[in-house]
Image (cartoon, rainbow, N blue to C red):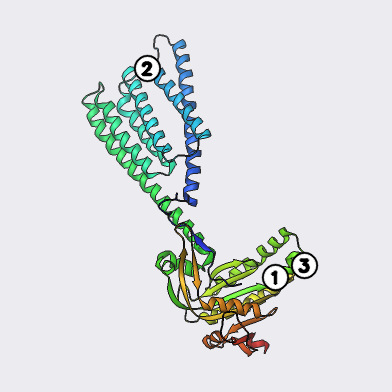
Amino acid sequence: MTPVTHAAAEPTASAADAPSPINDYERRRREVETVNELVVSAITAALMASMLVISVIWTVEYPFLPVPPEVRLVSTVMLVAHLGILAVLATRRYSPLRKYVIVVVRMALLGGVCWAEWFHRNPAYGLVRPTSLFAVTIMITALSYSRGALVLAGVLACILYPTISLLGPAWPASLHASLFAVQLFIAVTYVAHRLVSQMRTMSDDSVSNERLSRFFSPQVAAQIATEPALAIHAAECQVSVLMSDISGFTAMASRMPPDEVVGLLNAYFPRMVAIVFRHGGTLEKFIGDALLAVWGAPVASPDHADRAVAAATEMQQAVAAFNVAQRAAGRPTITIHVGIASGPAAAGYIGADRYVQYAVMGDTTNVAARICTSAGPDEILVSDATRRGHSGRGVVFEDVPAIVAKGKDGPVTVHRVRAAESR
């Protein structure tokens, strides 16, 4: 294997001639928006149907106080409109313009209800109840988690209420009511807009941090979150690259059902990744049963060789504990072999417009892969550069025959790592 890039992949903005992929947040936002609109429209339709039924009962019980036909007309229109919205939400594909259309329809219908109620039933209604109805509608719009829809709802409320109020029969009280209502609508829109903005920011940060935590240790991920340029801009750095591989895995996997192979890897890899992160490393990628990790990028680490070797020795210990659990459960055991190389490498995001990945590239990565291939079961081999860069604490380096690595002009000097206490 010759790994040159890793799978810490992130989508970027699309090319000019290609549609941008929907990110996780936007997909979830659309799902929540649709559900919320379904609930609100269903409740509104039910209320309008209830109002129409009550108006019929009222007319029968109190014929001397009939419900104005304008009220019934607007209520019927509002019922039909929300039934139509329900049908569109249930049968049509999502459209980014949908939420704006719903805001316009809902605000226009609300204005019609207020006009009908005010002029034909209760003039005082026009100065009090519509204010709260418009404010509630603005807050309902926040359920779409769309700042644009919120602003549109606020603007329409500021236009419709004064229009209805100032044209009504309650002048000059309507002027004062309009001034108060406009201020209220602006305040409600502002507060709702801030809440939605903060929620979107927290969601974006959460998704970004979750993605970073898949490949970087918590300390490195936190630093990248505050200093994105650490990972974005490619730079040459001194690193130690570790590759571990399960010995004889191909033959083992050929004798196992596919689901058991996946189960084995899913039980094994989390233990190894935890060790990489515990020693401040970056997870490069998984290559079948192999794992590639790096120390010294994207954050420089003077003791990268010490950290990589310490992680390798802990991996071997963790495999021994893993095998104890495997035997107890009647499952196959494994051994791993590890190769580490140290030296210069170029680290940063590479890829196309719509898909990039963080990569540590160069001869050091390739040498680590060759050394890993040459290591035997339960063996840790490191390059001479790793041995020279190591402090020597806690381990012993044993000389072994040099290996022949593809692409290298001569043999590669390597050393076997043993724990100091086992010497």
What kind of residue is marked 3? Answer: Ala
Instruction: Say which residue appears at 56% left-offset and 72% top-offset.
Output: 293
Residue on which disc 2 sits: 70
**Label 3 neighbour load within 10 Å: few <14, some 14-19, many 20+:** few
Q: Amino acid at mark 1?
A: Phe
Residue under pointer 1: 322
| Disc 2 residue type (three-letter) | Glu
Choose the circle earlier in sequence order: 1 or 2: 2
Tell me the distance, in whole angstroms, between the alpha carbons under discs 3 and 1. 10 Å
Report the side of 158 relative to 195 (left or right). left
Q: Which mark is residue 393?
A: none
Please identify the quarter of the rendering in which residue 128 is found: top left
Residue placed most toward the observer, 388 or 394: 388
The secondary structure type at the circle numbered 3 is helix
| Residue highlighted by disc 3 | 328
The quadrant the N terminus occupies is bottom right
Residue plotted at (37% across, 17% down):
70
What x and y, as percent, mark residue 295?
51, 76
Tell which of 199 and 236 is nearer to you: 236
Q: Residue furthest left?
A: 172
Q: Earlier in the sequence, mark 3 or mark 2?
A: 2
Q: Which numbered disc flags the more N-terminal residue, 3 or 1? A: 1
Q: Position of residue 201 (x, y in %)?
A: 41, 53
Residue at the extreme right of the image, as rendered: 330
Q: Residues within 10 Å of mark 1 (few under 14, many from 20)?
A: some
Q: Taking 137 as reference, is 29 above or below it?
A: below
Name the secondary structure under disc 1.
helix
